[in-house]
C-alpha cells in the first residue's frame, strides 16, 4: 500500500534453468483477468496506462520500462524496480506485474509471433477511501424448450458483472425464476467469479432447469461482492439485484399437437375415402344386377 505521490522499491529475480545462456526482456504492465478467470498482463507491445506505467526497472542511467538481461546457464539475475505513484492517483487497487520473456531477434521477418513469459504479480493499492461496488449489466434471458414435449425446459440467463468500484472483488451470483403468480419457482447459484478487477468486467451464465412453458417467466439476479484472498476491505459490501423476463411459449408442445391433429385428420380422411370406395363398389354392383334383370 502506497500513498499518492509516494514510492516503493522492490525487486524480481529471473532464473535461467537451461544449460545455455539466455537473454530475456523484463518489463512491467497492467493487470487484467482473462475470460477463464486467470490473472494476466497486457499483451507484449501494449503500453500500460495504470499501475504498470508507474514501474521503472533497473537503477541509474539504465533504468526504464524494460530491461534486457543475459543470464548464464543455471544462473539468476535480480532486477530492482521502483513504483512511483502519481500524486493524483485514485485510491484503491491498481493491479500490475513484472514479466520476463525470451528476447526476440529484431528484424527476423516473421509474420507469426509466439510469446511465452513468466511473471510476478504486484498487488498495488493506493491509500485512501475504498469504494467496493459491483453492477449487473447486459442481462439476457432466453427460454430453451426440451425436445421431449412431456418434459419442462430451462431458462438460460447470461449477464455481465462489472466492477464499478476501486477495489478488486469476487462475485457470488444467484438467480431465481417463477411463472405467473409465482408458480413453478426455481433458484440456482451460478459459478462464482473469483476476481473482477476495478474498471473491468466478467461474463457469466446460469441455467435454471425444470421450467414449464406457460407464458411469461420472470426472476431476479443478485450478485454479492466477496473479499478476494487476504485483502482487507473495511467497508460494508452490498449486494445488487436486477430483474429479467423471458417468454416461455410451448412451441414444442404446440408442434406435437399439430402433428397429432394432422395424424388424426389423415386417418379420418383415409377412412372416409375407403368407405366412399366401398360404397361406390356396392352401388356399381347393384346397378349391374339391375341391368341384368332388365
Image (cartoon, rainbow, N blue to C red):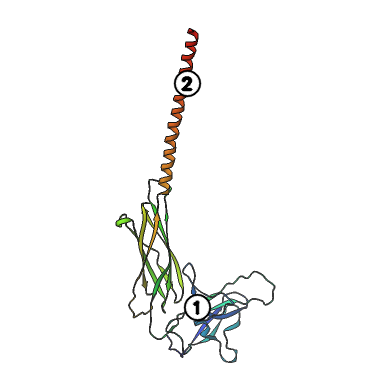
Q: Where is residue 293 shown, x and y percent of the image? A: 48, 7
C-alpha span from label 1 to label 2: 93 Å
Residue that label 1 marks: 120
Q: Where is residue 46 shown, x and y percent of the image? A: 57, 77
Give above or below for 87 relative to 191: below
Say the numbered circle drawn on residue 280.
2
Specify few, some or many for label 2: CA neighbours under 10 Å numbering under 14, 14-19, or 20 or more: few
Identify the residue at the far front of this view. Answer: 294
Specify few, some or many for label 1: CA neighbours under 10 Å numbering under 14, 14-19, or 20 or more: some
Residue 258 visible in the current orientation: yes
In the image, which is nearer the foreground, mark 1 or mark 2? Answer: 2
Q: Nearer the viewer, residue 68 or 206?
A: 206
Question: What is the secondary structure assignment of the residue under circle 2?
Answer: helix
Q: Earlier in the sequence, mark 1 or mark 2?
A: 1
Q: Nearer the viewer, residue 285 or 107?
A: 285
Quarter in which the N terminus is drawn = bottom left
Q: Residue at x 46, y 24 (%)?
A: 276
Q: Are marks 1 and 2 in contact (CB under 8 Å)?
A: no
Q: Residue at x 44, y 36 (%)?
A: 263
Q: Where is residue 264 shown, x and y percent of the image? A: 42, 35
Q: Is residue 204 left or right of residue 49?
A: left
Give above or below for 257 relative to 269: below
Q: Nearer the viewer, residue 172 or 138?
A: 138
Residue 175 visible in the current orientation: no
Specify the quadrant of the image occupied by residue 164.
bottom left
Q: Is residue 153 left or right of residue 58?
A: left
Question: What is the secondary structure assignment of the residue under circle 1?
Answer: strand
Say the numbered circle drawn on residue 199.
none
Q: Is residue 69 left or right of residue 5?
A: right
Q: Where is residue 38 shown, x and y percent of the image? A: 48, 70
Amino acid at each position: 500500500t502506497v500513498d499518492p505521490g509516494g514510492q516503493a522499491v522492490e525487486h524480481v529475480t529471473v532464473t535461467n534453468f537451461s544449460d545455455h545462456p539466455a537473454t530475456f526482456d523484463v518489463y512491467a504492465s497492467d493487470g487484467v483477468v482473462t475470460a477463464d478467470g486467470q490473472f494476466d498482463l497486457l499483451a507484449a507491445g501494449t503500453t500500460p496506462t495504470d499501475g504498470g506505467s508507474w514501474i521503472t526497472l533497473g537503477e541509474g542511467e539504465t533504468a526504464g520500462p524494460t530491461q534486457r538481461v543475459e543470464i548464464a546457464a543455471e544462473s539468476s539475475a535480480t532486477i530492482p524496480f521502483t513504483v512511483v505513484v502519481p500524486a493524483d492517483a485514485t485510491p484503491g487497487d491498481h493491479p500490475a506485474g513484472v514479466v520476463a520473456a525470451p528476447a526476440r531477434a529484431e528484424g527476423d521477418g516473421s509474420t507469426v509471433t509466439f510469446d511465452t513469459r513468466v511473471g510476478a504479480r504486484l498487488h498495488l493499492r493506493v491509500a485512501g477511501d475504498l469504494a467496493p461496488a459491483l453492477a449487473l449489466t447486459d442481462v439476457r434471458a432466453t427460454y430453451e424448450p426440451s425436445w421431449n414435449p412431456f418434459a419442462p425446459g430451462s431458462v438460460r440467463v447470461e449477464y455481465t458483472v462489472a466492477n464499478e468500484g476501486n477495489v478488486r472483488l469476487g462475485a457470488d451470483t444467484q438467480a431465481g425464476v417463477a411463472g405467473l403468480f409465482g408458480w413453478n419457482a426455481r433458484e440456482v447459484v451460478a459459478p462464482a467469479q473469483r476476481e473482477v478487477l476495478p474498471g473491468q468486467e466478467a461474463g457469466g451464465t446460469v441455467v435454471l432447469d425444470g421450467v414449464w412453458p406457460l407464458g411469461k417467466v420472470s426472476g431476479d439476479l443478485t450478485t454479492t461482492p466477496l473479499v478476494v484472498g487476504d485483502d482487507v476491505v473495511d467497508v460494508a459490501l452490498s449486494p445488487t439485484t436486477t430483474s429479467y423476463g423471458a417468454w416461455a411459449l410451448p412451441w414444442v408442445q404446440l408442434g406435437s399437437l399439430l402433428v397429432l391433429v394432422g395424424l388424426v385428420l389423415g386417418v379420418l380422411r383415409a377412412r372416409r375415402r375407403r368407405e366412399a370406395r366401398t360404397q361406390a363398389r356396392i352401388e356399381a354392383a347393384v346397378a349391374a344386377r339391375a341391368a341384368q334383370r332388365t
